[in-house]
Amino acid sequence: MNLEASYVAVSKFVRLPGGLRLEYLEYGTGTGTPAVLLHGVTDSCRSFEPVLPLLPATLRVLALSQRGHGDSDRPESGYGYSDLSGDLAAFLDALGIDKAVIIGHSMGAMVAQRFAIDHPTRVAGLMLIGAFSTLYNDGGIAAFVASSIDPLGDPISAEFAREWQLSTTARPIDPEFLDIVIRETVKVPARVWRAAFHGFLETPDFSAELGRLAVPVSILWGDQDTYALRGHQEALLAAMPHARFLVYEGGHALHWEQPAAVAGAIGAFMNV
């Protein structure tokens, strides 16, 4: 499958009031409440390319490259969850969107949670894919950061990027798409890798605040996810007992491994 040729989303840029320029992909002809897709760390809006063409064209879907990622601007600072939540609010403002369904993968799922807490009236629904409840002072992540992230220098090697991205999968993914993922990954400067991962470790657990949410929530999880473990899912479900929990065969990068299933779940969540 030639993703480069078959992909139909439109690539766009928007400049936020503070001057930050963000890249995004827009898919669909819908005029109702849109869905905003937030990628994982070192990915980009292109992370959702396997999913977007499988969604109903009657939706309006916006896949965002968060600061430091893809072809968005790469400022020196501002890579914590709250910073990225603020960017999302400014992004919606810039596009004249009052409320959206927020769908996040991995880091994007943490930003989605933070945004739902910070801006509850702007969230029509929340979908979390490969989500963590918290990474605050996580010993395993801290060891990984010390051994693999802190020593990184520019440019990021394609070999490291490939190893990193394949570590998130448990099932084969399209090799052409993997090449796209690697090209996007090496765009991210080493300083952004470090800032993002240290932000994960330094942000206190805020999952208890999710209990205030009154919107529909779905949590999608791959049963072979070696990053966002089952315990994280149980913690999120304890915080949000009304959430729907959907388990699939696959790893952390569920939207790459099971794009049709994820697209189906998004379509059902959006009631189309």
Image (cartoon, grey):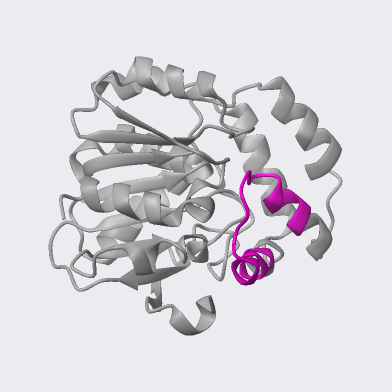
The residue at 25%/53% (across/down) is 267
Q: Nearer the viewer, residue 121 or 156?
A: 156
**Is residue 163 covered in magenta?**
yes
State the extent of the magenta-drawn residues as a range.
Answer: 162-182
Q: How far across and down, in percent of the image, does residue 5 sit?
A: 49, 84
Can residue 70 be spotted in the picture? yes
The residue at 73%/50% (across/down) is 164
Magenta segment's dominant SS is helix
Which quadrant of the view contains residue 196? top right
Q: Is residue 123 left or right of residue 148?
A: left
Q: Is residue 242 left or right of residue 189?
A: left
Q: Quadrant of the C terminus?
A: bottom left
Can residue 17 be spotted in the picture? no
Which quadrant of the view contains residue 263? bottom left
Q: How far across and down, in percent of the image, does residue 204 sit?
A: 53, 22
Q: How far across and down, in percent of the image, does residue 225 sit?
A: 58, 34
The residue at 39%/39% (across/down) is 128
